[in-house]
Amino acid sequence: MSRISQIELDDRNLPPPTPEIEQERKVAIFDLIEDNSFVLPKRDERDTPEGPYHLALSIREKRLVFDIETEGGDKAAEFHLSLSPFRQVVKDYYQICESYFTAVKTLPPSQIETIDMARRGIHNEGSRVLQERLEGKAEVDTDTARRLFTLICVLHFGG
């Protein structure tokens, strides 16, 4: 049961998302809830509560906050990650997404495919950075990291 069963984004202080960003958010949350792997390892020789977990993601004081509770509402973990390692990859991801959304409206499929391949490459890089930053705090598989990276981008949108 080492998985996320519920996710909440604290986006109260962000500008309203574009329709494309809102769609990315909905798809990422749906896919994440349907299939994910999220393990909290032992820390300081203390056992961690078993999942499934409720995850609240937010940005506070320029840090990405993972606030994790059990389904019963007990605190399972909380950790804060610096946003610095994510800044460039999030910026690159937004730029390529803008190109992709424009291309879908005007370019032939071969050019759209090329842009989409670049977009997936940047997305993979973001998920790799996330997995590195979570080391020792939480273990996630590649697909879970990709979906969480999408949600970090949504939070970064106005941050």
Image (cartoon, rainbow, N blue to C red):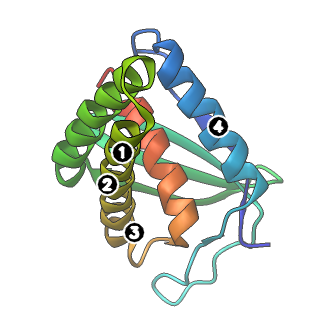
31, above or below 94, in the image:
below
- The foreground one among 121 and 15 is 121
Q: Residue at x 40, y 16 (%)?
A: 14
* Residue marked by disc 4: 27
Q: Secondary structure at mark 1?
A: strand
Q: Is residue 33 left or right of residue 62?
A: right
Q: Residue at x 34, y 34 (%)?
A: 60
Instruction: Tell me how far mark 3 sits from mark 4, CA to CA.
Output: 20 Å
Please name whichever residue, 145 or 23, is drawn nearer the observer in this view of the structure. 23
Q: Secondary structure at mark 3?
A: helix
Mark 2 Cα shell of 10 Å, populated few (<14), some (14-19), many (≥20): some
Q: Amino acid at mark 1?
A: Leu
| Image quarter of the N terminus | bottom right
Q: Which residue is mark 3?
A: 131
**Type of the residue with mark 3:** Gln
> Could you tell me how far apart the alpha carbons at marks 1 and 3 are, in whole angstroms?
14 Å
The image shows residue 54 at horizontal and vertical percentages of 70, 50
Q: Which is nearer the N-term, disc 1 or disc 3?
A: 1
Crowding at dot 1, Cα within 10 Å, few <14 / some 14-19 / many 20+, comes out as many
Asked if the residue under mark 3 is in contact with the one under mark 1, i.e. CB atoms within 8 Å, the reply is: no
Q: Earlier in the sequence, mark 3 or mark 4?
A: 4
Looking at the image, do the residues carrying marks 1 and 2 touch, with CB atoms under 8 Å apart?
Answer: yes
**Residue type pointed to by label 2:** Leu
Mark 1 lies on residue:
64
Which image quarter holds the C terminus?
A: top left
Read off the residue under disc 2. 81
